[in-house]
Amino acid sequence: MCIFSKPLSTGKLAPNFSLPDQDNKLRTLSEFRGSYVVLYFYPKDNTPGCTKEACGLRDNFDTFAKQSIIIVGVSYDSPETHAQFKEKHQLPFTLLSDTDKKVAHLYGANRKLIPLPQRMTFIINPQGIICAILPKVDVTTHATDILELIEQDEKNNT
């Protein structure tokens, strides 16, 4: 029995979606087209691993911003919980609320036996194509892993 849906593959167009952010503003993936997007799914706000992962991205945010890389976190938490998590940890990036689990399912980040999304990351290039997938994330090296993958993709496309 499969415990989570099959994830997407590299080289494919990232499926578009709309979800509310931490301010309850509807955000659409396509609005970020033209920049690299790091779409990271994580289980839950204010848990040890998720906090470490988010703070690692925060601590490297200047490097991401200088390269026009957009960070977007997705979990099943409510916009209100996201707002508190973002404020508490001074997170400078968008957090999206997938309370109905549809986007996690679309991206293969849902788990059937556990009511939390799978920790995984999709790197989407400026044309909207998935150029890398991290199906297993090490929260301590997540930010540097992302930067290396984007650098590799840029080299492959020049």
Image: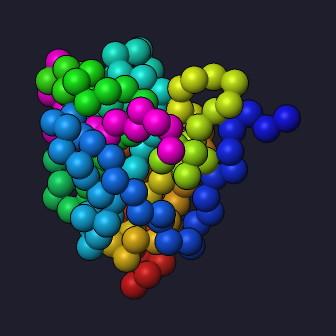
Colour scheme in the image? Answer: rainbow
Assign the magenta stretch its main secondary structure: loop
What residue is shown at x 85% (from left), y 35% (from top)? 1
Q: How far across and down, in percent of the image, does residue 75 sit? A: 41, 33
In this rendering, the count of numbered labels is: 0
Q: How far across and down, in percent of the image, does residue 82 sit? A: 26, 27
**Is residue 89 covered in magenta?**
yes
What residue is shown at x 48% (from left), y 47% (from top)? 103
Task: Using the rendered view, name the quadrant where residue 68 is placed.
Answer: bottom left
Along the viewing direction, whichever of 137 and 145 lies nearer the viewer: 137
What residue is shown at x 59% (from left), y 37% (from top)? 110
Q: How far across and down, in percent of the image, does residue 21 sit? A: 24, 40
Residue 13 visible in image? yes
Task: Using the rendered view, name the quadrant where residue 98 is placed.
Answer: top left
Along the viewing direction, whichever of 75 and 133 lies nearer the viewer: 75
**Is residue 123 covered in magenta?**
no
Q: How far across and down, in percent of the image, does residue 114 sit? A: 63, 22
Residue 38 visible in image? no
Please report the bounds of the magenta region as a residue range.
88-102
The outermost residue toward the bottom is: 158
Left or right, residue 107 beside residue 61: right
Along the viewing direction, whichever of 37 and 27 lies nearer the viewer: 27
The outermost residue toward the right is: 1
The quarter of the rendered structure image containing the C terminus is bottom left
What residue is shown at x 43% (from left), y 81% (from top)? 157
